[in-house]
Each structure stands twice: as C-alpha cells, then as structure tokens.
Image (spheres, rainbow, N blue to C red):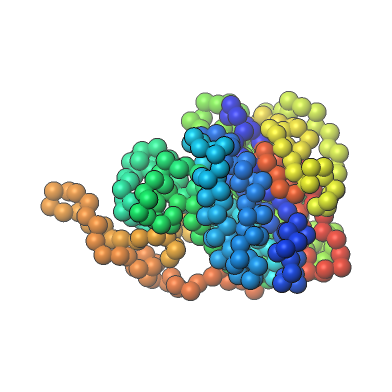
Amino acid sequence: MQGWRISMEDAHTTVLDLLASNADASKNHPQRLSFFGVFDGHGGDKVALFTGENIHNIIAKQDTFKAGNYEQALKDGFLATDRAILNDPKYEEEVSGCTACVGLLTDDKIYVANAGDSRSVLGVKGRAKPLSFDHKPQNEGEKARITAAGGFVDFGRVNGNLALSRAIGDFEFKKSAELAPEQQIVTAYPDVVVHDLSDDDEFLVIACDGIWDCQSSQAVTEFVRRGIAAKQDLDKICENMMDNCLASNSETGGVGCDNMTMIVIGFLRGRSKEEWYEEVARRVANGDGPCAPPEYAEFRGPGVHHNFDDNDSGNDYDNESLSNKGKSFGIGGYRGRIIFLGDGTEVLTDSDDTEMFDNSEEDKDLASQVSKKSTSTDDNGHEVIGSPVTPEKLDPKFDLNQKASGSGAGAGGNSSSETAKEDDKDSKTTAKKEA
C-alpha cells in the first residue's frame, strides 16, 4: 500500500519453490525451500526494487547455500546483494537504501534474516514470538559499531540522518576501505534466527515498519489470528490490517502515513488449507491462546473508502501461473489497487498493556551485533568507550548459541501476499496475492 507517501518505495518477494527456479542449487537439497521477503526502501525505490527482484537468486548461488548451510548463505547473500548493487555502473550515484527481512522455509525450520527495522513475527497459539530484532542506531551494540567506524548517533539517527543502522545500499555510510562490510557505519550484514517448527506455530508475519509503527507485534498476531478464525483469506486479513494502520489524513506526524507491506504465511504442516483454518478456529473457540475480539474480523477502520473498484478476482496461483515469472509490479500491486482509509486505531485484545506494548524483545542487542562496547561518562560528562560488552552483561539469560526454539519475486510492495506451507510433498501449495 502506498498510503500517503508521494511514491511507493517498498518491494517484496514471494517464491514458493526456490529450488525450482534455481536448478543448479537444487541438486543437494531433497526438500523444497520457500522464500519470502519485505524490503522497505528509503531515499528512492531503486535499491529496494533490485533487492526484491534478485536477492533470493543471489542467496541460492552462494556456495554455502549449495552446501546446505542456509544460515551462513543468508548472511553471504545479503552482503553479495549489497556488493552487486555497489559494483553495477547503473547504481554508481545511487543514494537510496532498503531494509531486508526475509524468511527461508524448509519443511521443519524457519530461517529469518534481517537487516534494518522491518520485522518478522511468529504466531504461536496467539502469542507473538519475534524472529527478528529491529536495528536502531540507539541500540547499544549498533551504536558501538557506528562510533567505532567514525560515525555518530544524533536524535536516534545515524549521523543525524538515517533512522536504521543496517541496510542494503546507503553507500554513503560504507566508505571506510579499511573496515570489513560488517564493521561499516551502516552494514548489510543480517542477524539470522533459526526456529524449529512445531504444531503450535500457526503463521508467520513479515512486514515493514509502516505496520509496526502503528501496531505492536502482539496486536498484529491477535488480529491475524482472529481473521483466520473467521475463515478469511490471508490477503484479506493483510488488507484489513493495513486499513487499520493507515491514517485518515496526512497530519498525524508520520504515524500511519508510511508505505505498508505485509506478508502472512500459514503453516499447513500436512493438513489441507481448510483443515488448517478449522484447527485455528477450534483453538480460538476453546480459548487456547489470545485472540482479538470477533468484531475485528471485519474491522476496516473508521471512514474507510476505496478509490478503486473493490472487486476481488480471487485468483489462485502457483509459482508458475503468474505472468512475468510470478512477479508483481507497480504502486497498485498485481491488480493495481490503492486504499486510502483508516484512523490508526489500536486493536483491542485479550492481552494486558505490558505484553501488548513491550517491544524489548524486538529491540534487544544480539550476539551478532558487531563491536559491542560498554560506555561510561568521564568527569566532564563525555561518553567514554570501554571494554567490550558480552551478551551476558546485556541479558543474563542470553545464550551465545541460542536459536529461537519451538516445538515469484515481486516488487511494488504495496501488495499483501499469502501462502501456505505443508510437509506433505504430494499436495500442491498455492498462494494468493492481493494489492
């Protein structure tokens, strides 16, 4: 959704069968892999569009990917995508950049790689479990890297300018030839979280900050779950969520005015799509986990109106059936629709305020953040960088070896997309996409 912005700078990627589109990479991989990503552009759309169209193929070409080391392949692929743009003469004077939050799904695992402040959240029986962590300049580990590379943080922005500390592109912050890519003021190096899928895991949400600036992770999780319990198509749920976030005018100080992109992936795990819907609805009816009130299944925000025809063709597609190899382009998404609506109203949920609005999990520092250093203040009030800070100091419960535990490419990210993944290799996975 473009929203109130003058231009649409988001892009997204949905590839149901990554191996099918990369024959060379498929030789040593018995299982099917699916790939989804959201790329929130800033300063223009060129880097976001390039990333949305190419990053999955670049990742699949990495030697580590071919060896089955998907965690390292995601890290290598992010940096390789950054280099590809930097070395392309077409982008010689390009100043834009983008976030990158992607999910690589196998039959039993989720690999989430993130650089920037887009976010991936897992719905576990109605509870939001973060699978990515926002890279903000004021985070301790991020600030330490920025200052060590010669930059500074002012008013929560890198060099007083950029509101996120990791991104693809933004090459004006990557000019220190003596530093590795991971150590630059702004880096494309991602955090990667690996999660073992369980039967409690119901769906995954990947979205840009146009959603998360308006809604907490828990609120989005409960909203999506209510829509599933009401048997709504996932693309419809995404529309309703964006309707709820978008401000009714452009005078809200930016909240609810941003471009919005949201992807929801449902985990069928051997069930049919209808059986998956029934299971989630049964859990909700039995009070098995929190869920937004029933009225939010049809909530569209006050004063909602559409400036284009609202007819939904309801097209199903697999990865082969869309023209242009499954891509969708343009401000209106695949069918060219833009919605102007909403009032930024917060979702009412069963959870208390502490759970709903506590983003500490998303904001915390990770072990992979580069050059963590403690800071103190001298007698003159100046900040002094001291010894490195271990993850244990940041969080006593932090485990250096922790992994999140648990039991088409498209550009023009104003569209919301849906897919479902299952373990039964004999059944066909389909997806729906809607602008």
Q: Image quarter for residue 215?
A: top right
Q: Is residue 172 visible?
A: yes
Q: Tell how many labels.
A: 0
Give percent across and percent down for residue 339: 70, 31
Q: Image quarter for residue 128?
A: bottom right
Residue situated furthest front in the rendering: 89
Residue at 76% of width from left, 38% of height from top?
334
- Compared with residue 192, is residue 347 higher up or lower down, i.e. above or below? above
Residue at 71% of width from left, 56% of height from top?
265
Residue at 63% of width from left, 55% of height from top?
58
Which quarter of the rendering shows the N terminus?
top right
Q: Is residue 84 left or right of residue 396?
A: right
Give percent across and percent down for residue 396: 38, 71
Give percent across and percent down for residue 330: 70, 34
Which quarter of the rendering shows the C terminus?
top right
Q: Nearer the viewer, residue 366 or 343?
A: 366
Q: Nearer the viewer, residue 46 or 292?
A: 46
Give percent across and percent down for residue 176: 36, 49
Q: Is residue 261 left or right of residue 387?
A: right
Residue at 66% of width from left, 60% of height from top?
60
Q: Is residue 121 left or right of residue 434?
A: left
